Amino acid sequence: MSVHMTDTTLFADSVGTREMRDVFDENNMLQSWLNVEVALAKAQSALGVIPADAGDIIAAGADISRIDLDAVKESGRVTGHSLMGLLGEFRKIIDHECARYVHFGATTQDILDTGMMLMVKDGYDIVLAQLTRCMKSLSDIVASHADTVMVGRTHGNHGMPITFGFKAASWLSELGRQKERLTQARSRILAGNLTGAVGTFASWGGKGVDIQAKALKILGLNAPDIVWHSSRDRIAELMSLCAQLAGSSCRIGRNVYHLSRTEFRELEEPSKGKIGSSTMPHKKNPVHSEWIMILERTIRANSSICLEVMGQEDEREAARWKNEWIAIPETFVMLSGILNHLGIILGGLTVKKEQMLKNTGILKGMLSSEKIMFLLEKKFPLPEAHTKVYNASVSAVENNTYLIDELLSDIEISGCFTREELEKELDPAGYVGLSSSIALGVLEKVKGQIEPVD
């Protein structure tokens, strides 16, 4: 029976994706350990540390489906060791004198860390592909709504007019930076580790560096310049990058969530077939945005845990290290879930242009108060112009009137400007600044990051 939500029948696809779960599935994890053992044996065979045919003989038995996992479990229960049970059953499958060369001179953490990196490598590819798809959908939104006028909000209140394309471009630019960070850090993070008990290659004579390099090349991982059993900065960086991407996704989700409120009704998630409430039939809940916000918190917490793991003692210890065994798979599965929800949102987002424009009039002209202030500045000193617009705004709020009427009730203003002149300045569409051109500039900049995705 499943306990963690990532594996439950009911919630698994809300919390993550099948593709990412398969990467960190227990069988795949154990297979990755066998793959590391095989790469090590092949490198040692090629370099004459073990018999020349040992690598191929060992490789022939490295199939997790042939391993008795119940026996592995029982060994772990008795010995308390993470790897010995698997090695014992693996050697039985090989059934050859060369089985003695399995795990020759390696230490358990070598195998588990390198195996984890093999899974991370596959998970990395999935995340980047999902992120690229999200960016492509978001690019389409930016292009379509570069000129769609809406309210720009600050401190939870109406500020000045912007365009929705401008708002969406800020999301796109941020996702682009997250992709840059992930891409730039990839080679630094994806390194294996096959260095022996305390990282000195002592059991392999003078061939340790070459053995590690050759084995890791087989596995498609980079070779470190020195053992990283206790240097957990690679994992800490990886988890921090995952948390940052989750955070950027959360910002988008929160924006969509709030702009879909009944009072705003500017955006709407894809909702066909979804039931918002068991008792309120009319409800359309922003469920995808909610899941993004839920999962982001756990990923951020996992990042914090992995920063603590950096405080390792001596050359190796497990009291911190094993926290990564929980944090890494959980984070990758949940990050895939976040990006799946984000992709659904961005791929089917309803943008209500008319409602956005309507909402710019809620303040009855005050959304363009700055533009009016600068118009008045042509006749009055700027501080005085500010005071006049401020006083008119206060009166408009108190009297529930339009700003233009309060402005024209000021004899000095009505003596300098006509209603038509003021009305022209109060049009929100005329005061969005460089919203459109900036949005299109972001679109152009990220084009190179949006490679075709099958």
Image (tube, grey):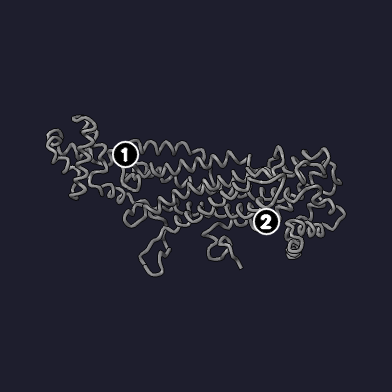
Q: Is residue 197 left or right of residue 451?
A: right
Residues at circles 1 and 2 in contact by the CB criterion of under 8 Å: no
Asked if one can make out residue 220 in the rendered structure from this viewpoint, the answer is no
In the rendered structure, find residue 432 and report the number of the disc placed on it. 1
Q: Is residue 88 left or right of residue 131?
A: right
Dot 2 falls on a residue whose secondary structure is helix
Question: Which residue occupies the foreground of this view, 15 or 411?
Answer: 411
Q: Residue at x 46, y 40 (%)?
A: 173
Please rate how many residues cluster around mark 1, counting C-alpha atoms within 10 Å: few if below 14, some from 14 to 19, many from 20.
Answer: many
> Which residue is label 2 attached to?
28
Q: Position of residue 8 (x, y in %)?
A: 57, 64
Asked if one can make out residue 65 in the rendered structure from this viewpoint, the answer is yes
> What separation in Å lies between label 1 and label 2 (alpha carbons)?
53 Å
Dot 1 falls on a residue whose secondary structure is loop
Residue 44 image-quadrant placement: top right
> Which sits earlier in the primary sequence, circle 1 or circle 2?
2
Please rate how many residues cluster around mark 2, counting C-alpha atoms within 10 Å: few if below 14, some from 14 to 19, many from 20.
Answer: some
Q: Position of residue 303 (x, y in %)?
A: 56, 49
Q: Is residue 8 left or right of residue 197?
A: left
Of the residues shown, which amino acid type is indicated by label 2? Asn
